[in-house]
Image (cartoon, grey):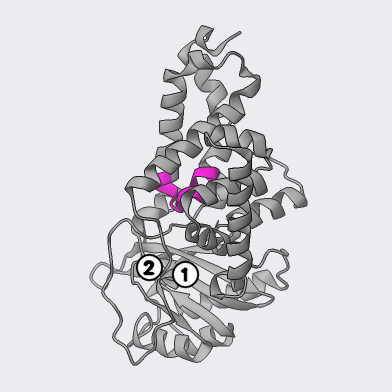
Amino acid sequence: MSLADQSRDELGAQFELYRRELRAHCYRMLGAIQDAEDMVQETFLRAWRRRDTLETTSSLKSWLYAIATNICLDTLKRRPRRVAPVMLGAASTLAEPIPEKTFEPMWMEPYPDSLLLASPDPTPEDLLIEREQVALAFIVVLQLLPPRQRAVLLLRDVLDWPASEVAAFLDTTVPAVKSALHRARELIAARKLDHAAQLLNLNGEFDGAAQQLSAYVNAWEAGDGAALAQLLKEDATFSMPPIPAWYHGKESIHALVLSTVFDGDAYGRWRLLPTAANGQPAFGLYRQDETSGYYQAYGIQVVTFSGQLVSDITTFMDAGLLRHFKLPNALPPACG
């Protein structure tokens, strides 16, 4: 049966089988969860309108990926790329004033782990692959690639499509695909020497996870900068987009948090709810309103561990992100 012979509900049900993987693909292309959601919706709308151009459902998955990829490429022609503070230049120092927040839609966003594998019983290999393909540092490096190189790298190295199929997707030639892939791989390899790739922790090893995560939460909720510093690697990094700055080194981060998020009497100022993002530990971060005592949503914090120590803390200061993680907008005052 051709797609044109199916009802909208029948075809929509088939589209939905690919929502999770298409959304992850669009996220890798664009670096933002809301953009990814929008691109998937546009993909399904465009596929419905063009359903008579596909004869059978046997190639439906490839067809949807082709539509989604080209929609993302069209979007990237009109919008600036999404960035992380580390992509903007060298680490900031405490001698410099903290920059003003930049609220344009330019910042990368975290991706909820709950939107990854649809399988109820994924294998360890499945989980590792998903972590590798959506790790925050990998997404950072992807955004450094020109859009078409990014698309080729994802379609060839992540999705493992043949070069001939990728060429057909992108309306180009096989030699052009191979050339773009070569250039993309070279840039990825070069970036392995810098900060972004140092964040990658793809071997899945994290000893004493529960104990270290508990200590991390306790440090934040007690406003204890010294305890937080104890958990940091010497070369750890710290950023809070939309502030366009990032900080490097345990001593700098310790001094920074004491003068900002933990300044004054910070005990009980913060609450953290555990979640997971980009295959990494993450938290819904809440700040207490001094008048009501309630904790208001502040953003999503993604924590990268290397062994038992924290190598990066990225706090996405956007309360609207919590809805993607199905976390509440506010928490009641702590008892006692």
Dot placed on the residue nearer the N-terminal end, 1 or 2: 2
Mark 2, other Cα within 10 Å: few <14 / some 14–19 / many ≥20: many
Image coords of residue 191 (percent x, y): 58, 69
- Looking at numbered disc 2 in the image, what kind of residue is underneath it? Pro
Residue linked to disc 1: 314
Instruction: Give the left or right position of residue 120, taking residue 76 as reference.
Output: right
Q: Mark 1–mark 2 contact, CB under 8 Å? A: yes
Query: Which residue range is magenta in the image?
Result: 24-35
**Residue 127 visible, this angle:** yes
Viewer-proximal residue among 112 and 193:
193
Residue at 41% over, 62% down: 83
Image coords of residue 25 (percent x, y): 54, 44
Residue at 58% over, 44% down: 176
Residue at mark 1 to residue at mark 2: CA–CA distance: 8 Å
Viewer-proximal residue among 126 and 290:
126
**Residue 325 visible, this angle:** no
Question: Image quadrant for the N terminus?
Answer: top right
Question: Image quadrant for the C terminus?
Answer: bottom left
Residue linked to disc 2: 241
**Residue 29 lies in the magenta stretch:** yes
Viewer-proximal residue among 266 and 95:
95
* Type of secondary structure dominating the magenta stretch: helix
- Looking at numbered disc 1 in the image, what kind of residue is underneath it? Thr
Mark 1, other Cα within 10 Å: few <14 / some 14–19 / many ≥20: many
Dot 1 falls on a residue whose secondary structure is: strand
**Residue 324 lies in the magenta stretch:** no
